Amino acid sequence: MINKVEHLHDKYNFSNSEKEKIESSHQNLTISKETLQATYDVLAKATDELRTNYKSLVQERDELENTCKNATVEKDLLKVKNDNLTTERDALQVEVDRLRAAVPARNCPTGWTTFQSSCYFTSVEKINWRLARENCKTKGADLAIIKSTEEMTFVNGLYSTDKEVWIGLTDAGLEGQWKWVDGTPLTTPFWGKDQPNSFDGRNQDCVEFWHRATGKGDWNDENCNLEQNFICEK
């Protein structure tokens, strides 16, 4: 009888121990499940964010593709316009050259030099800008107006040594607003380096042509009272 009781007692203890193991295992499984659930939730959220980011990237890619296509179309249109303008410019240049060739050479007075449709006179005497202009007017001319690279090169070729000569450009009317003696504003400048500068604070309202050994020469602003050579044009 005692043995039976002890056997039952041992069986109970064994069953109780197994129960505790099962409960402990259940508890561990519950914790693992909760941990896995939390991990799953994080991964699910990350997946949703990735999907959202992917959609945004796809949309951005599509917009960039459209922008690129539009830019390509615009570039092609601009190229066509540029080609058309180039063709028009070349045609106009041909017409200008034809018209220039058709203009009869002007018979200039003795002592004057012909260029295109104008006559030019280079002075020997040196006087100030105002008197130089008056001198030109007595000859039915005015101080030279130079509006092209070709004319600059021509004038530069009139001199064999470095010279500074008055031309018909001034800002005496309003400082900084350069005008030719015929009243037209300056549109194509040929200033020398760092010019105009009213050097040393002097009142430099008149323009001189700087001859150069090669090339087309330059311009410089100078005091109108300075006495130097000048060039007339008519």
Image (tube, rainbow, N blue to C red):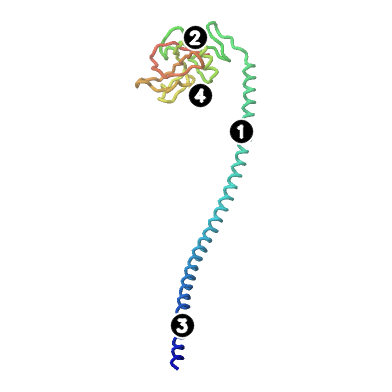
The label number, if any, that marks residue 14 in the structure image: 3
Q: Going by the picture, which residue comes out furthest to the bottom?
A: 1
Q: CA distance from mark 1 to mark 4?
A: 23 Å
**Circle 4 sits in a helix, a strand or a loop, which is it?**
loop
Q: Position of residue 33 (x, y in %)?
A: 49, 71
Question: Which residue is the site of mark 2?
Answer: 160
Question: Which residue is the site of mark 4?
Answer: 188
User: In terms of sequence position, does the residue under pointer 1 or pointer 3 come before the other?
Assistant: 3
User: In terms of sequence position, does the residue under pointer 3 or pointer 2 come before the other?
Assistant: 3
Task: Residue type at mark 4: give it.
Answer: Thr
- Crowd rating for badge 3 (residues with CA inside 10 Å; few <14, some 14–19, many 20+): few
Image depth: mark 1 or mark 3 in front = 3
Nearest to the observer: residue 10 or residue 129: 10
Q: CA distance from mark 3 to mark 2?
A: 128 Å
Determine whether 56 is above or below 29 in the image. above
- Crowd rating for badge 2 (residues with CA inside 10 Å; few <14, some 14–19, many 20+): few
Nearest to the observer: residue 1 or residue 179: 1
Label 1 close to label 3 by CB (< 8 Å): no
Nearest to the observer: residue 68 or residue 129: 68
User: In terms of sequence position, does the residue under pointer 1 or pointer 4 come before the other?
Assistant: 1
Q: Position of residue 157 (x, y in %)?
A: 52, 12
**Circle 3 sits in a helix, a strand or a loop, which is it?**
helix
Q: CA distance from mark 4 to mark 3?
A: 112 Å
Q: Position of residue 156 (x, y in %)?
A: 50, 14
Label 1 close to label 4 by CB (< 8 Å): no
Q: CA distance from mark 1 to mark 3?
A: 98 Å
User: In terms of sequence position, does the residue under pointer 2 or pointer 1 come before the other?
Assistant: 1
